Image: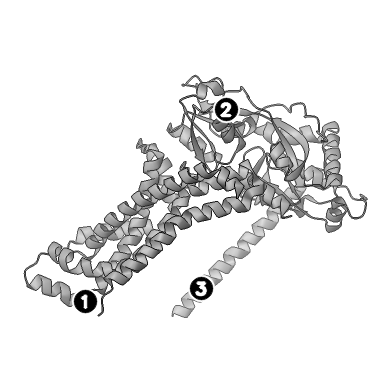
Amino acid sequence: MQFLIDNFSLLWDAFLTTLGLSALAGLLAIVLGTLLAAARVGPIPPLRGLATFYVEVFRNTPLTVVFFFLIFGLPQIDIILGFYTGAVLSLGLYTAAFVCEAVRSGINSVAAGQAEASRAIGLTFGQSLREVVLPQAFRTVVPPLGNVIIAMVKNSSIAAGFAISELSSLLPRLVNADAGQLTAILLGVVIGYMLITLPLAFVVHRVERRVAILR
Amino acid sequence: MRTTRYAASLAAAGLMLAACGGSEAGNQAEDAAENTAEVQEDVQFDAGTTMAELNEAGAMTVGTKFDQPGFGLLNPNTQAPEGFDVEIAKIIAAELGIEEDAIEWVETVSANREPFIQNGQVDIVAATYTINDTRKTLVDFAGPYYEAGQDIMVAEGNPEGIEGPDDLAGKNVCSVEGSTPAQNIRDNYPETTLTLFDVYSKCADALSAGQVQAVTTDNVILLGLVAGSDGAFELVGNAFTEEPYGIGLALGDTEFRNFINDVLEESYENGSWAEAWDRTAGAISGLEAPEPPAVDRY
């Protein structure tokens, strides 16, 4: 325990890095994922094809490979991202594919009659999506979306292998400092992740109850 | 219809497995042909010692690196590691009367060497393992059997003019998180920006992409990277620390430690140490076998 207190500032910095990385990547994933879902259910075939292609590529590629591509692949064609930018993009672009599928499942759960009715009263496709379908879709989507984001927080540990000093990168560093403290170090790192994921799970649960609709 | 398709794919998978098995056996035969150290047939050890136990079992488990050219690098064809550390472990096994094929190789990385020894998951660790005082409180060390030093690797022609660690100030320097060289830079050269990956091969990628200006770690590791770079990298060649590599074993097993120390000293004298160097790290780096370091019976 003393060991953890001695290294508290390291743990705190790493915790903030994980938190920041997760927040930015999560924002990117939710915005991009929702746009992708809209494109996948939309009436424009090229957009639909493009979004489907995106989802299949990112969903079926291991996250480590996405990181490798952005950090070491792009420099081959002279695009050099900073390591932090690279990490946010890798994590966000990858998670967006899963957000898209969660949101799309929500959209599909809204009865077709709702969309048809809104078109019948003269709303455009965008309006009907924005005003009628998506608000209902997001309600159904809260629990699976929460899962995707919680998984993303833990996936951010991949960034440790790509020059980001986040929580799990402390494992090898502190073990090298004192291998006798292995259990305390593991505990410290796990607590760091839980400080993010447990409140997140709590919020998801509250939102789920708040917006629940009876059908 | 569907059932037939499943059956067909299962059969195909079975065929592939059978084919793999065949080639593996072939590789083992090749290995035996180039067996390195001569296995001692009749050796006697005092009952109750680790040596007697291992000799009785006729097998041992050795932790080594799988990603370090010249010291411990996994050969994907044979699924066995190759390198100087591996050869030293084979010499020790041979003196215990254990066949090379009976050694089980376990990958150890910098962060799991102590736990593996403490939990008895490996009998010894030979993995570019620097002897230091913190580690001595957790495990025992035989050796050292090699003396490395922290050095710097730069792009060909040394465009940044880096001659030593003091020139790293303000530069972006790559190493591996949880390694002693990285900590040394943090503690003693705080002006340096560190970029830390989990393996050294990524440092090589980052150096060729220009994302970092230098890579720092033990010189022997860098030599392996330089050798594999087709002239894209070069070693500064100005080692600024001493990293004595030892064989890690369970804390307090003094008899086993003395035994390994004896084996190491014998290998210095009968030339098998130099031979092991020439065939592995020496062949990669083009360096002649150095003078072996004196064994430290602390």
| Circle 3: residue type | Ala
Residue B163, image quadrant: top right
Q: Are marks 1 and 3 in contact (CB under 8 Å)?
A: no
Residue at (43%, 53%) from the top-left corner? A63
Mark 2 and mark 3: Cα distance apart in space: 63 Å
Is any atom of residue A61 visible in this view? no
Location of residue B110 (image quadrant): top right
The residue at the point 16 percent across, 72 percent down is A115
Image quadrant in which the N terminus of chain B is located:
bottom left
Residue B122 located left or right of residue B219? right
Is residue B275 or residue B1 the one in the foreground? B275
Q: Quadrant of the C terminus of chain B?
A: top right
Residue wearing tag 3: B8
> As displayed, is residue B110 above or below residue B208?
below
Q: Which residue is mark 2?
A: B188
Q: Alpha-carbon distance for marks 1 and 3?
A: 42 Å
